[in-house]
Amino acid sequence: MNGATSKTQRWLWVTPRMPLPPRSGAEAYSGGLITALARSGVGLRVVCLGAPGGSSGADLGDLPIDLRPVASPRRSSFSGILSPTPRAAHNLATRAMRRELDRALAEGPYHVAVVDHLQSGWALPALLNAKRAGVVGPVCLITHNHETSARARTARAVGWGNPTRTALQMDAWKWEHFETRALRSVDLVTAITEVDRLRLVARRPDGQVLVLPPGYDGPRTKRPSPREKASRRAVILTSLDWRAKQANLEELLEAADDAYAKARAEIVVVGDAPASFRRRIESRMQATSFLGHVSDLGSALGSCRLALVSEPRVGGFEMKTLDLVFAGVPMAVLEGSASGLPLVPGKSCLSFSDIPSLVKGSLEAMDAPSVLLKVAEAAYDACRDSFDWPDSVLRLKRATAGAEA
């Protein structure tokens, strides 16, 4: 491994997509953990599906990280109709991914094996067999959210007349059983938020789930500043590679775009979006524009007075909220969409019980600069001494050592 020594702990890490450089919140969480572990002296071999365009990943310098991106198209969803494995995990379990995992295991042993995100749960049988053979130590499942409830919410949000509802309900049922088997088979489970920990512990034989919050090592403003000179513009910071994320955005824009246009205000959507989805949505919007992935996020956020955060279907921790907090952008949040942040509704965020209230309240706040400044300052103060990658990594290493013992 790059920079590894014989004394370095060696971990095998299986994750759905290339995590470095990250292009989504899930990849930011995975990449943050991987990088922080490497900086702490752990050598990692990372098996993942290759990024679009065949990128081999970020320049890692001397970090002991051996990225193994696999160039392979995903399996078709049609091929998984009769499989007990849920669609997203089934689609990743290509022959090329299985061969790369077998190759990595042949290069063992490893102190720890990590299944990062339940979408990588297809790798569990091979890793558990390797553990029995002494090739890997404890097997750890790093969850990004509680899949059972998240997938069920996605299915329920689709109307009864929509033909995809039945398919989503069946997939949600598969996720429930897949998640239960995974939680009962591994040595260690982590969750990002306390809310998800409570959902996961019921299915653990030992009732133990480690909360592993994300760190934040991005740019920070010294202090939030007044935003009345910014355009009358709200930002939605997102990544749209998941159907549930697309549905969340579409639902919000259907309610917000017309109201913002009438108020002569704007909405900008920042983050990657499939071209077909972007064209379909943008074509019928008046006040909304898509900026896509931006190289200078700070400038994009600095031109906006506030952020809209509405994630009723997804659950888990929204990594984008940390970018907003530390850029000093006040947030108007649909209840439940900022799980894991130590925010107080009405003080460190503007919180609303439904989307119409969120739209109305955000437009009212747009022209209340003193309110926005107080909210941004309170959010910054609440979060500034939290979200430390080295602390989370230390907790993970201690937990894996305990599982090994």
Image: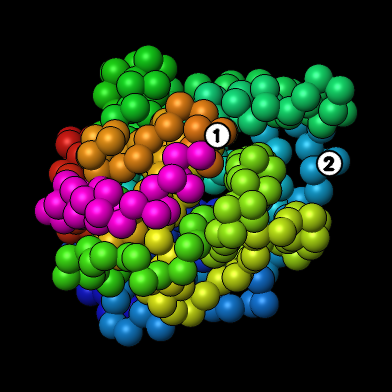
Q: Position of residue 170 (x, y in %)?
A: 74, 23
Give whichever of discs 1 and 2 has the lower sequence position: 2
Q: Which residues are magenta?
A: 360-387
Q: Position of residue 404 (x, y in %)?
A: 23, 38
Q: Amino acid at mark 2?
A: Ser
The prevailing secondary structure element of the residues shown in magenta is: helix
19 is higher (above) or lower (below) than 146: below
The answer to whether residue 343 is visible is yes
Q: Is residue 362 magenta?
A: yes
In the image, 95: left or right of 317?
right
Q: Is residue 193 magenta?
A: no
Task: State the quadrant of the N terminus.
Answer: bottom left
Give me the disc on residue 355.
1
Residue at the (29%, 30%) spot, across then down: 194
- SS for tag 2? helix
Identify the residue position indicated by label 2 in the image: 79
Give the quarter of the image for residue 4.
bottom left
